[in-house]
Amino acid sequence: MIVTTTKLFQTAYGKFAVGAYNINNLEQTMGLFRGNLQSQAPFILQISKGARSYTHKTMLEGLIRSADDIFPESVFAVHLDHGDEETCYDCINSGFYSSVMIDASHEDFETNIAITKRVVDAAHAKGVVVEAELGMLGGVEEHVAVEEADAKLTDPDQALEFVERTGIDSLACAIGTSHGAFKFSGTQGLRFDVLEEIQKNLPGFPLVMHGSSSVPQEEVKRINDAGGKLLGAKGVDADQFKRASELGVTKINIDTDGRLVWTRVHREFFNEKPENFDLRPPGKVFMTAYADFIAAKNVYLGSAGQLEKIREILG
Ligand code: 13P
């Protein structure tokens, strides 16, 4: 069942975070739905601009609608990740997306507000909810590339004004994480002090943490042992998700970790079976590995086991 994030966030607030996972293809879609049912978790399925053009946006929509039929117990939001204004309108008008993110965080404060407000007005008119970002995460994510020096933490005082003037439904905060597999290049970690200030200014308001892949070292080692070159890759300690959710984070974005699972499975598979050239055997291994990864991640997020309650609330 496709839902907006409103009820998910109300239920989660202060207690757990809903996992927001990016998909690009059939195998990720199957693994994602299986893993969330395995762990009985509601979830947010994220589609980036890059994913929409990888095959075709209509292909992704078809995959997700089919998955919804195949796994009727599932409860999830369909969310545009890091949208520009034009892509947001396309998703809002499609009648398929239940949530969009407008990312104008690279603009100055007033321009960010103006663009975000336009998207909010269009989205709310169609019952779609909106996430927007204030501050700027470092790292690379598809078309979004921000040098560490340009990354900017969210200003807690501006956060209140931003939310009030735009009417958004959730706020993506920059609190020290970055996109990709190479986080925390300096000595900084998660800035819970900043998050605490934001929550003080916006009590009860759903916050979002981007750049939250854990980049498991075991996964990185296996990739490198199988011929990869991911040197110095590191991520967010998943044990910190609980503290973040207590401070108002209701959505945690994870994309890179899924790519690492894909890379590890395929590198190992073809290393072990160099004579093989069929795409289905590694695809099967990946779907199972990705489902297991999602189920395990949901335990850290606290969303595992919440599905029944959410279904009751949604009626
Ligand atoms: P990661 O690169 O840490 O997975 O972050 C993904 C993300 O924030 C998507 O918006």
Image (cartoon, rainbow, N blue to C red):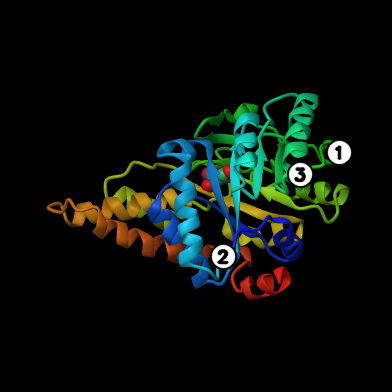
Label 3 sits on a secondary structure element that is helix
Image height of 12 relative to 186, above or below: below
Residue 167 versus residue 313 in the image, above or below: above
Q: What residue type is labelled 2?
A: Asn
Q: How crowded is mark 2: few (under 14 residues within 10 Å), some or many (20 or more)?
A: many
**Nearest the camera: 232 or 203?**
203
Query: On the image, numbered disc 3 is attached to which residue?
Result: 124
Query: Residue at the location (58% across, 59% down)?
Result: 238
Image disc number at residue 157? 1
Mark 3 → mark 2, Cα distance in angstroms: 29 Å
Is residue 84 shown to the viewer in this render? yes
Q: Looking at the image, which residue is at 69% across and 41% down? A: 174
| Image spot of residue 206 (x, y percent) | 76, 53
Q: Quadrant of the C terminus?
A: bottom right
- Please state if 223 lies on the left or on the right of 83 as rendered: left
Point out residue 299 in the picture as x, y percentages from the top left corner: 57, 68
- Residues at marks 2 and 1 touching, judged by CB atoms closer than 8 Å: no
Q: Which of marks 3 and 2 is nearer the N terminus?
A: 3
Choose between 272 and 313: the one closer to the eye. 313
Going by the numbered disc 3, the residue's amino acid type is: His
| Label 3, label 1: how far apart the Cα atoms are | 25 Å
Label at residue 248: none
Q: Which of marks 3 and 1 is nearer the N terminus?
A: 3
| Place of residue 11 in the rendered image (x, y in percent of width and height, measured from the top left) | 74, 65
Circle 2 residue: 298
Mark 3 surroundings: few (<14), some (14-19) or many (≥20) residues within 10 A: some
Q: Which of marks 2 and 1 is nearer the N terminus?
A: 1
Q: Can residue 137 be seen in this view?
A: no
